[in-house]
Image (spheres, rainbow, N blue to C red):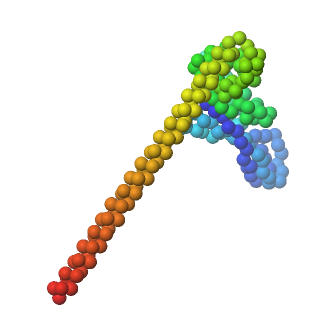
């Protein structure tokens, strides 16, 4: 799951910020409202106000305390909070990429060790130098190698997928052209038949 944050101006006719109910009435104005775009998978994306999602997190925490929410669901919420904090601090770009939590070969202890060194994505880990990796902790070299293999394979898969999509698009275009040619041929044949019929009609007269 990935989070992208942005702001949109919202017009308030009475100058009241819906996220600040204690504010008194004032002149009409615009305020910046924070939104989050949540990429669930390659096909699914939802958009929500950040304030609404933060409220949802509080409700989920309450449910977690009652044992009704799984650890994986809480990981997504914790990832949101960390990404939002990075967004507010202007460091979100450093976190863009494949979250460590999506890589099943990493244990929670591995992820905690990497997070402690401000490493949040496989791309961050894969670009570390040997010296930087040694400073991360025991076993970090092996983790970096796994990250690099994943990134390499993922890049290859994306390239293959791109070629496949291009081939599919080309096949679709060729099919459309063939259909157009068939339609043109049918129209031409129909026109020729009409001309012939008209010529025969004139002869009979």
Q: Position of residue 121 (x, y in %)?
A: 67, 27
Q: Please name whichever residue, 106 or 177, is drawn nearer the observer in this view of the structure.
A: 177
- Give the number of callouts: 0
Question: Of residues 184 and 58, which is closer to you in this image?
Answer: 184
197 in relation to 64, above or below: below
Which quarter of the figure is the N terminus placed in?
top right
Q: List the single residue furthest toward the bottom.
A: 205
Residue 44 position (above or below residue 186): above
21 and 138: which is toward the camera = 138
Name above or below for residue 61 compared with residue 189: above
Q: Residue at x 62, y 17 (%)?
A: 106
Q: Is residue 81 visible?
A: no
Looking at the picture, how far across and down is residue 85, in whole percent?
76, 31
Q: Is residue 192 left or right of residue 5?
A: left
Measuring 23% from the left and 77% from the top, which residue is drawn there? Answer: 196
Task: Tell whether 166 sits left or right of 25.
Answer: left
Tell me if residue 179 can be seen. Answer: yes
The residue at the point 74 percent across, 52 percent down is 11
Picture residue at 30% right of the left edge, 65% below the top? 186
Q: Residue furthest left?
A: 204
Q: Position of residue 101 (x, y in %)?
A: 63, 23
Q: Residue furthest top?
A: 138
> Quarter-wise, where is residue 95 in the image?
top right
**Which of the pair 24/178 is nearer the observer?**
178
Q: Quadrant of the C terminus?
A: bottom left
Q: Within the image, what quadrant is residue 117 found in?
A: top right
The image position of residue 91, as x and y in percent, is: 77, 33
| Left or right of 56, for residue 32 | right
């Amino acid at each position: 799951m990935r989070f992208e944050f942005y702001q949109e101006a919202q017009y308030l006719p009475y100058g009241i910020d819906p996220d600040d109910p204690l504010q008194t009435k004032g002149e009409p104005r615009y305020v910046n409202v924070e939104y989050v775009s949540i990429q669930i998978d390659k096909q699914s994306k939802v958009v929500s106000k950040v304030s609404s999602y933060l409220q949802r997190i509080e409700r989920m925490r309450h449910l977690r305390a009652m044992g009704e929410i799984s650890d994986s669901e809480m990981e997504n919420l914790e990832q949101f909070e960390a990404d939002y904090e990075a967004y507010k601090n202007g460091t979100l770009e450093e976190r863009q990429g494949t979250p460590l939590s999506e890589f099943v070969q990493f244990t929670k202890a591995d992820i905690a060790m990497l997070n402690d060194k401000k490493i949040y994505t496989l791309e961050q880990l894969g670009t570390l130098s040997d010296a930087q990796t040694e400073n991360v902790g025991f076993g970090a070299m092996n983790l970096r190698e796994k990250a690099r293999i994943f990134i390499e394979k993922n890049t290859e898969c994306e390239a293959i997928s791109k070629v496949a999509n291009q081939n599919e698009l080309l096949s679709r275009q060729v099919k459309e052209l063939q259909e157009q040619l068939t339609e043109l041929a049918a129209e031409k044949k129909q026109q020729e038949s009409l001309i012939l019929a008209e010529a025969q009609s004139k002869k009979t007269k």
